[in-house]
């Protein structure tokens, strides 16, 4: 059977929070019988945009990771819910408000922090993937409100069989949050390295002038990982790096230098390298 998946591109998200506003517009003060009760006006972030800063001034970047419920296939919340949380055949994980009422422990069962407590109604609530809209014939097919409202197209829905999704994941190099948990999320990310991995960046100067076109080679354990040419500011940047020791070799028109650097959970601005 076809399943619903959400694909989120970290590279294009601008932290405008239009997705969150649309979610509130759809769910605050609105009851969707058989789906969920109304979301409280404050305190709930059914799609939460996390901010990640990397590097040191002036070579820095900031990325944003929208984070709704991951609609996990092996969802810890289902195990903790004692029948109050279920996974629909189309992959959407739903909390039954009646059966979940009073069970605040559901919040700690989610390793992604995606469940929120409605203190007035005494229920745990979260993103429903806008299942009431996906099931409706009176709304755009396959478009939750947050997806509809995203001005950069960073959020996309996919409705395919699992085998087809596996091909998309492979072709688009999609990844999931915290794969070590083995929860099998139905939310996939593009460019998640912008939040989870690191970069090495620097500028190359010769006689205090920016040197464009120097060949920079990045090696790890003697193997070439990447090569690039410096830009018109003399800058280079290698991104998506794991922790470990790297060697950077620079060849600027025959003048060469090599430097060993270590990534330890932090992106590195090496400043200017003078040849
Ligand atoms: S609406 Fe789109 S661009 Fe804006 S924060 Fe949400 S996902 Fe990012
Ligand atoms: S992200 Fe959390 S709330 Fe959503 S399905 Fe997974 S465990 Fe449950
Ligand atoms: S899919 Fe619907 S419920 Fe989930 S975050 Fe988007 S707007 Fe909110």
Image (cartoon, rainbow, N blue to C red):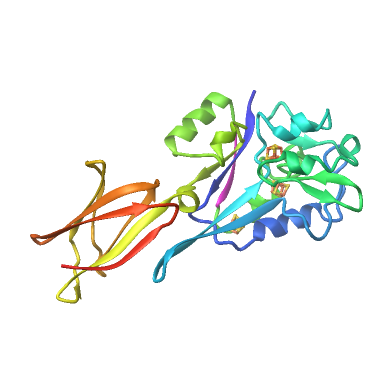
Query: How many labels sit on residues?
Result: 0
Residue span colored magenta: 154-159
Residue at the image position 45 percent from the left and 63 percent from the top: 61
- 115 left or right of 181 in image: right
Check the image and report above or below for 241 versus 178.
below
- 264 left or right of 270 in image: right
Residue at the image position 53 percent from the left and 24 percent from the top: 163
Find residue 274 and report its image quarter: bottom left
Find residue 60 and report its image quarter: bottom left
Q: Nearer the viewer, residue 167 or 134?
A: 167
Q: Nearer the viewer, residue 52 or 34?
A: 52
Residue at the image position 52 percent from the left and 52 percent from the top: 10
Q: Is residue 275 magenta?
A: no
Residue 47 x, y percent position in the rendering: 68, 51
The overriding secondary structure of the stretch rendered in magenta is: strand
Residue 256 x, y percent position in the rendering: 12, 59
Residue 86 x, y percent position in the rendering: 77, 30
Residue at the image position 81 percent from the left and 40 percent from the top: 105
Q: Is residue 207 visible?
A: yes
- Image quadrant holding the C terminus, namely bottom left
Q: Is residue 86 visible?
A: no
Q: Nearer the viewer, residue 164 or 44?
A: 44
Check the image and report above or below for 203 versus 226.
below
Residue 18 x, y percent position in the rendering: 66, 60
Q: Nearer the viewer, residue 21 or 44?
A: 44
- 10 left or right of 142 in image: left
Looking at this view, name the residue that lies furthest to the bottom.
208
């Amino acid at each position: 059977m076809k399943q619903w998946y959400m694909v989120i591109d970290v590279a294009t998200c601008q932290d405008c929070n239009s997705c969150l506003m649309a979610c509130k517009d759809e769910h605050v003060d609105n009851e969707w019988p058989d789906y969920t009760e109304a979301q409280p006006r404050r305190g709930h972030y059914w799609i939460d945009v996390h901010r990640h800063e990397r590097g040191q001034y002036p070579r820095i970047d900031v990325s944003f990771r929208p984070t709704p419920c991951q609609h996990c296939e092996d969802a810890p919340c289902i195990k903790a819910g004692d029948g109050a949380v279920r996974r629909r055949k189309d992959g959407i994980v739903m909390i039954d408000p009646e059966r979940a009422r009073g069970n605040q422990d559901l919040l700690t069962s989610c390793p992604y922090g995606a469940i929120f407590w409605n203190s007035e109604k005494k229920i745990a609530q979260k993103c429903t993937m806008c299942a009431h809209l996906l099931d409706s014939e009176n709304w755009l097919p396959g478009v939750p409100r947050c997806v509809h409202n995203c001005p950069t197209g960073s959020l996309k829905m996919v409705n395919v069989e699992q085998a087809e999704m596996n091909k998309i994941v492979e072709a688009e190099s999609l990844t999931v949050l915290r794969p070590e948990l083995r929860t099998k999320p139905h939310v996939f990310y593009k460019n998640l390295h912008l939040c989870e991995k690191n970069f090495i960046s620097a500028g190359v100067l010769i006689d205090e002038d920016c040197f464009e076109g120097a060949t920079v080679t990045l090696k790890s354990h003697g193997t070439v990982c990447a090569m690039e040419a410096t830009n018109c500011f003399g800058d280079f940047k290698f991104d998506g790096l794991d922790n470990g020791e790297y060697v950077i070799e620079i060849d600027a028109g025959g003048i060469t230098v090599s430097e060993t650097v270590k990534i330890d959970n932090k992106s590195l601005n090496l400043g200017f390298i003078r040849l």
